[in-house]
Amino acid sequence: MSGLKPVELTGRFGFGTMSMTWKPVPPPTEQSLESLRFITSHEEFGTHLLNGGEFYGPNSANLKLLKQFVDSNPQEINEKLIISIKGASNLTTLAPDGSKDSITRSIENIISHFPAEKSKRPKLIFEISRVDPNVPYVETLGYIADYVKTGKIDGISLSEVGIESIKKAVNSGYPISCIEVELSLLTLDILNNGILAEAAEHQIPIIAYSPLCRGLLTDQAAESPDFLKEIPEKDMRHYFEKFYPENFAQNIKVVKLLYKFAHEVKKTSLESLALSWILKISGAKEYRGIKNLPKILPIPSGSTTAKIESNFGNIVELSEEDLAAINKILDENPIVGGRYNKRAEAHLNG
């Protein structure tokens, strides 16, 4: 679209907000607000990119939290902020709905939570959460682009897309700001299925969600003999294959090997090693056969300011030798189980 440009993503990190509103027992609102203020204002590792979802909790709970945060901010904070929000899912089944009515309903709901005047709100990026197989993808992108054209939102992100959908988006001419997909030391799918290579070809930034693999890439997981039992009963991780008991028994071995490397070789936490690895391959000239990797921004979360500081504050520089050692661990100890489960994965890589 003539004259429209992608939203430029600055900094090395983003910050995910799903766990603040979409879990069996969400943290107190004031605690979440304190965490958001901390991560967006910290001089060393502060981020300007927040990631949310219309369906992250009941009754637009995530949008209400983000609205409260934005409303409490001074203007100089909001004008630097970028908020990327997933939507256009059936709020009962969570199936994607790329129809015009669905996109309109979702975007109108999202923008109603933020100041109408563009100069007083953060930049807003919208992404349909998955590809709707019942609506041509370019048509769905066109409905979103209409809102970019009017200035009601600022950018378009792709989410959980396959190679063909990326090509369609690029060929459409619509301004694509980023692609949100899962990536971590334990989830290397996009390195092996061509998605990262396709993003690299067009230099579209990657938003890497679950960079700590839903808590598996943490010191707590490596150190606790009862980590799996400690996951709350209604936690969604119980439905994900990596956490099935028979798979977890193998996967935790890999976690412990990475933990040992983090602590003994790099003198840092497993969390920080996992984030440092993503930062190392971001923009790399080559990694695992992929040339000229695009910018990759991990979006970890953090329930408290102490946890955020622990995750973000101990980043280490990784050498090529470190990467080789990490690759050896991963190659010799394959992860067992998919990213979600068979039913949920039907909507991935659309």
Image (cartoon, helix red, strand yellow):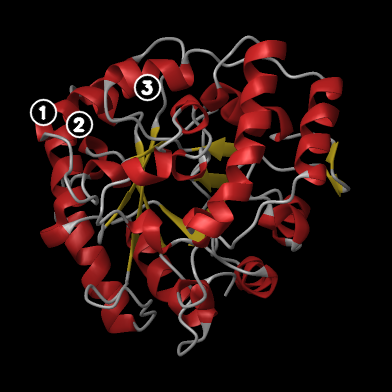
**Lower sequence index among marks 3 and 1:** 1
Name the secondary structure under disc 2: helix
Q: In the rendered image, which residue does mark 2 sit on?
A: 32
Q: Quadrant of residue 87?
A: bottom left
Asked if disc 1 and disc 2 are in contact, CB closer than 8 Å, the reply is yes
Does residue 64 sit above or below 100 in this rendering?
above
Q: CA distance from mark 3 to mark 2?
A: 11 Å
Q: Amino acid at mark 2?
A: Ser
Q: Identify which residue is drawn at 39% across, 54% down.
A: 237
Does residue 65 sit above or below 278 in this rendering?
below
Please state if 105 lies on the left or on the right of 156 as rendered: left
Name the secondary structure under disc 1: helix
Q: Identify which residue is drawn at 21% across, 47% down.
A: 21
Query: 4 or 62: nearer the eye?
Result: 62
Does residue 189 sit above or below 225 in this rendering?
below
Please state if 78 lies on the left or on the right of 328 as rendered: left
* The N terminus - image quarter: bottom right
Q: Position of residue 97 (x, y in %)?
A: 36, 80
* Residue 308, label in figure: 3
Q: Amino acid at mark 3?
A: Ile
Q: Amino acid at mark 1?
A: Glu
Instruction: Pick out the residue farthest to the bottom.
Output: 134
* Residue 30, label in figure: 1
Q: Identify which residue is drawn at 64% across, 67% down.
A: 166
Does residue 183 appear anywhere in the picture? no
Q: Quadrant of residue 169?
A: bottom right
Query: 329 or 79: nearer the eye?
Result: 329
Q: Position of residue 249 (x, y in %)?
A: 57, 48
